[in-house]
Each structure stands twice: as C-alpha cells, then as structure tokens.
Image (cartoon, helix red, strand yellow):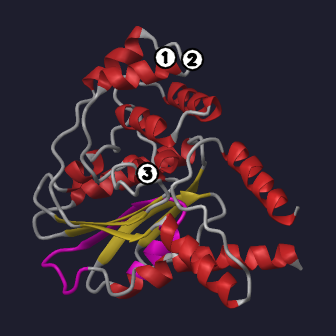
Amino acid sequence: MLRQTMTDYFLAAVEAAGAAATLPGRLPRGVPLGRTFVLGCGKAAAEMARVARGELAGAVSGCVVTRHGHGVADAIPGIEVIEAGHPVPDAAAREAAQAIMALAAQAGPDDRVVFLISGGGSALLCAPAAGLDFAEKQAMTGHLIRSGAPIEHINLVRRHLSRVKGGRLAALAGARGAELYTYLISDVVGDDPALVASGPTIAAPFEPEAAIALLGQYGWVTSEATQAAIRANRPCAAQPHPVVTLATNRDALDAVHRRASAEGWNVIDLGADLRGEASDAGHDHAARARELIA
C-alpha cells in the first residue's frame, strides 16, 4: 500500500510539472504570415508538442525528439516524434538532430519557431561538432556520466562538442529573421535555462579551454584533433527572444507536499536544490527516515 501511495505522489509531481498543466495559454497568439515550426527535445518533448499542436493556429509543422518509450499514443498532425537513446546518444539521436536542424534552417522572416525543451535533451539531440567523430562523442558522454561529474560540468562539455547546444540551434533558426520562442520544463538545480538540455536555444559563454580541462579532470584523454574541434566550434550569436520556464523541480515537490499534507502525512521537505550522486542522496534519505522512526 505504501509503495502505491509513493507511486501516486510521484505521478502527481509529474502531472503538476507536465505540459498539460503548464503549457496551455502560454504559447504565442495569432497566426504568422508564414509557417509555425515546432522543434523540441527532451523526455517531455512529445507531450509538449501534443499540447502545443492543439493550441497553435495556422500551418504547423515540426519535429521533436524524446526518449525511447516517452512518445505519445497518437500521431501529432504535422509534427514528427522521434524516439532516441538516453543518457548516451544513439543513431536515432543523431538523425533527430539532423531533421530538426534542417527544419530550423528553413525558417524565414515570416515564420515563427516554437522551441519545446525539457530535461534529457542533451543526449537526445546529438549533432557532433565538425571534426568530432560520433562514436567518440558517445564514448565521451558515457565516460562523463559514469565519472560522477555534476550536470553543470557535463553540460558545459556537451555544448562545446555540439553543433546545436549553447544557443546554436536558435542561431540557425533565427538566421533569416524568424520569430523565436522557447518554452522550458527545467530539471536542473537553480533552473538556469542555459543548463536545461545544454541550452540549444540559450546563448552561453564559449569556454573551450574549460571544456578540455574538465575532460581531463574526469579522466578522459582528449586527442589533439578533438581539442582542435572544440576550439573551432565557436557559436554564432543567438537571436534574443522570449524564454518561458513552465515548470521546475520546485513545482513538482510542491504538488507532492500539498497532496501528502492533505492526506495526513507530516511532510519533511529537503528542498529542490539537492546535488551530488543519486545513490548518495538515497542513502542520506534512508538514514533520515531511520532516525525519524527510531
């Protein structure tokens, strides 16, 4: 029974931070002179696209990529949903990035581009920088994840290995003057938009030496060719545009707190800014629970 209760609370948290609860009424109104492109990545991207398609008027087309098993039941008119590997990118993630970049490049001055970004998008949208081998990028990503590096460090490296992260996708979509909007569901501590999915639509500092140093810090021997590719991967300027954070970890925790309190539980909220290795956090939670029942 307790396990079912915990499952119910988890689902309540997901629902509170999900697209159906947070996206309606937030999208741009009216119809552009041209087309609306919906482009997205992340574990919530398919559901975000489903909700967005029901709200957007006019000619809508697009492509989003989500994790295997995180698609939606029915096809979304005009919007392709690709399922790909996470947390290490697979061939489908590379194909998704190519499709999304191709659509972004089509956007012209009369068009509108709506970006839908959520956690997990770093792996799911994979376009290696020029001169970087896809297999090597897979290996580097897997190594960083296993190393226990914090997500801030992993995503700093990721954006320097990519042709879409660190604002590069927005720069491509806005190159001919399209109207841009970004909608985020954050899964990162602090909710910095540049860290969610490594910020494909958010400009970030170009710090190649920091990326190379972090790879070394976590035990990856970076070849001279890879170092050259990182240093050459300078991003174009991303067009400033509205960026809306729809939901955060705090919103999910608040939903659990409200429901559990209403059902008579004494809730101890450890906050939304926990950092570190998940297994360590689990041990800390268990130790806290043992203290409370002693």
Q: Are marks 3 and 1 in contact (CB under 8 Å)?
A: no
Residue corresponding to mark 1 = 216
Q: What residue type is disc 3 on? A: Ala
- Residue 239 at x, y percent in the picture: 15, 54
Q: Are marks 3 and 2 in contact (CB under 8 Å)?
A: no
Magenta-colored span: 28-52
Residue corresponding to mark 3 = 197
Which of the 4 image quadrants contains residue 53? bottom left
Q: Are marks 1 and 2 in contact (CB under 8 Å)?
A: yes
Name the outermost residue toward the bottom: 262
Q: Residue at x 31, y 58 (%)?
A: 103
Figure check: 271 above or below 4: above
Figure check: 146 above or below 34: above
Mark earlier in primary sequence (3, 1):
3
Estimate how packed mark 1 is, as few (under 14), some (14 to 19) or many (20 or more) residues with alpha carbons within 10 Å: few
Estimate how packed mark 2 is, as few (under 14), some (14 to 19) or many (20 or more) residues with alpha carbons within 10 Å: few
Please indicate whether residue 19 sits to the left or right of residue 7 in the image: left
